[in-house]
Amino acid sequence: MKYMILSFGSQQDYDEMAGGGDRPWTGAEVGAMVEFMTKLNNDLEASGELVETRGLAAPVHTRRIGRSHGDNVVTDGPYAETQEVLAGYWVVECDSFDRATEIASMLGDCPAPAHVVVRGYADVRPIAEGPVDDIEV
C-alpha cells in the first residue's frame, strides 16, 4: 500500500533557514538537515520503499484559488491566518501503516535548532487506490 508522509513548516521557518528572521539557522544547521534528508531519502530508495519525495517552495510563493460570488478568486501567499503549511512530502510504498508511521517518525531525528524541533510533526495518510472504503489501516 502507498502512504503519503506530510511535513509542515511556516514562512518563518523558511526565512530562518535562509539566514533571516528572528533566529537564523547557521550554515552548519542547514547542512546537517540536508545531509539527514539526503541519507533518509537514499535509504528509502535503497529499500525500495520510496516512490517520490519533494520539498516545497516557501509559502510566500503560494497562490490560493477560491470562489466568491461565483467567480474564481486568486490570492497570493503567505497567509497570515495560516501558521503552518505543507513544507514537503514523501510517497512511500510499504507493507503496513505501522511501517509508514515508523518511516515518518524518523523525521523527528532531523537536526534543526531546538525551537524548530519542539514544534515539528508529520502526518501519515494512506493513499486511496480506489473507493475510500477500500483503505485498510
Image (tube, rainbow, N blue to C red):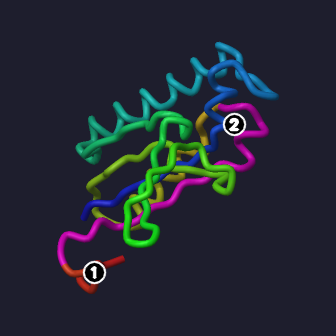
Mark 1 or mark 2, which has the lower sequence index?
A: 2
Residue 86, horizontal then vertical, whole percent: 50, 49
Q: Is residue 123 magenta?
A: yes
**Viewer-nearest of labels 1 and 2?**
2
Comparing 131 with 51, the one in front is: 131
Q: Name the amino acid type tagged 2.
A: Gln
Q: Report helix, strand or loop for mark 2.
A: helix
Comparing 17 with 79, the one in front is: 79
Residue under numbered circle 1: 132
Relative horizontal placement of residue 105, taking residue 81 as reference (left or right): left
Viewport quadrant of the N terminus: bottom left
Q: Residues within 10 Å of mark 1 (few under 14, many from 20)?
A: few
Q: Is residue 50 above or below residue 37?
A: below
Residue 65, horizontal then vertical, whole percent: 42, 56
Outermost top residue: 27
Marks 1 and 2, how far apart at CA: 35 Å
Q: Is residue 17 magenta?
A: no
What's the mark number on residue 12?
A: 2
Relative horizontal placement of residue 31, taking residue 81 as reference (left or right): left
Viewport quadrant of the C terminus: bottom left
The residue at 23%/82% (across/down) is: 134
In the figure, residue 132 lies in which quadrant?
bottom left
Q: Report helix, strand or loop for mark 1.
A: helix
The magenta-colored residue range is: 112-130
Q: Name the amino acid type tagged 1.
A: Val
